[in-house]
Amino acid sequence: MSGFFDALETREPAEREATLMAQLPSFLARAAVGSAHAARVLGRAEPGDIVSRPALAALPLTRKSDLIEAQAAAPPFAGLNGVPVGSLARIFVSPGPIHEPQGQGTDTFRFARALHATGLRAGDVMQNCFAYHFTPAGFMLEGGARALGCPVVPAGTGNTEAQARAMAHLRPRAYSGTPEFLKTILERADELSLDVSSVQLGHVSGGALLPALRRFYADRGVAVLQSYATAECGVIAYESEAREGLILDEEVIVEIVRPGSGDPVAEGEVGEVVVTVFDEAYPLIRFATGDLSAILPGLSPCGRTNTRIRGWMGRADQAAKMRGLFVRPEMVAEIARQCPGLGRMRLVISEEAGHDRMELRAEVPRGSAEDAALRDRLAAVLQGVTRLRGEVSLVPAGTLPNDGRIIDDTRPLPA
């Protein structure tokens, strides 16, 4: 496999950043006209002033967890659509339910670039085992394959024996679907003595491509790469042949922010993935995915120059219920706001002798771990914000894990 999808992939990083920031004001202006939600996000901010990442970071987040209630109150999309409903290509219904609009076009979810990095080329047949029913996944991958000139077998999910027989008969070169399902198909084909050796490539998403599974495919002669995508944003990042992190798509702006606050974190720090998508039909501005990741330093050995992330590292929308009240990452962010100058914070909830216990651990500058006044101040703010009493531990800077976890509920699960 060689070559790049287009020249955008090898631009100087500074050129890419300048281009994205130059495109941002006009996109925001159009979004504010077409989308009531985008207009609310901008508020009194002038689109022409949003020309940098700090300016973008000053806008509020749109949280996936808020969409269910918002769309129930203002159907069908709570004003998130940027074009009239009648001009859309499809309307998807994801669990929740959350309703997502799709605009006109062949590859509106931008999967062609990711599939090209996997090795698909014009004329390669792809058996697409993502779902087509209500959800966008099947159409996402099909749109990218069609944009590359690849015929698609719209196999969908399940029906393992039928999948194996179709694979043996149609001889596709590529598979797309969840990471585990290809293994299920290949093993069923072995049981049926079917030749499915035509499959040389796989593009997977929607789950973890674990090392053991990757080795299984490699032993079968199948090169499997992955992408990180959501129903709302389409492709956010994809894997290249270097297999060193996931490379950001060229048509999105990604921020990694501290869970609960929306404030960007330093490179390498684990935080929540926030995406701005240049999609006229679905103009998402600072969409908080609820997923954790981190930016990797340096560039990919494959020659692509866009920023890399570590991939999916868990969920950011942590919450726990204690003594009848919820504690959330936003509360820890508020504590940090009221007590500036501290490092990472973590709220640890545990059970001791049948009683819930809450402890706020906060990183402090060197020599401050015994500051009783600071400990008392944090305890008072903790109670004021959460309405719950808790203990406070001051720990040296760099002590707490860099894993994006803000609330750590260690209580045993009920039997």
Image (cartoon, helix red, strand yellow):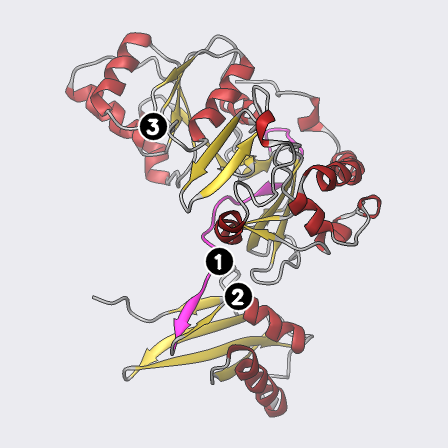
Are discs 2 and 1 less than 8 Å apart at CB? yes
Left or right, 305 with respect to 186, comes to right
Residue 195 percent location from the top left of the image: 24, 12
Question: Seen from this angle, which residue lies furthest right?
Answer: 48
Circle 1: element type: loop
Local SS, label 2 = helix
Location of mark 3 (residue): 217
Position of residue 244 measured from the top left corner of the image (x, y, whole percent): 53, 38
Q: Which residue is mark 1?
A: 317
Q: Amino acid at mark 3?
A: Tyr
Q: Position of residue 107 (x, y in %)?
A: 56, 22
Foreground disc of the pair 1, 3: 1
Q: Which residues are magenta?
A: 301-322
- First along the sequence among labels 1 and 3: 3
Residue that badge 2 annotates: 329
Q: Nearer the viewer, residue 144 or 113?
A: 144
Q: Marks 3 and 1: in contact by CB < 8 Å?
A: no
Which is more toward the observer, 7 or 33? 33
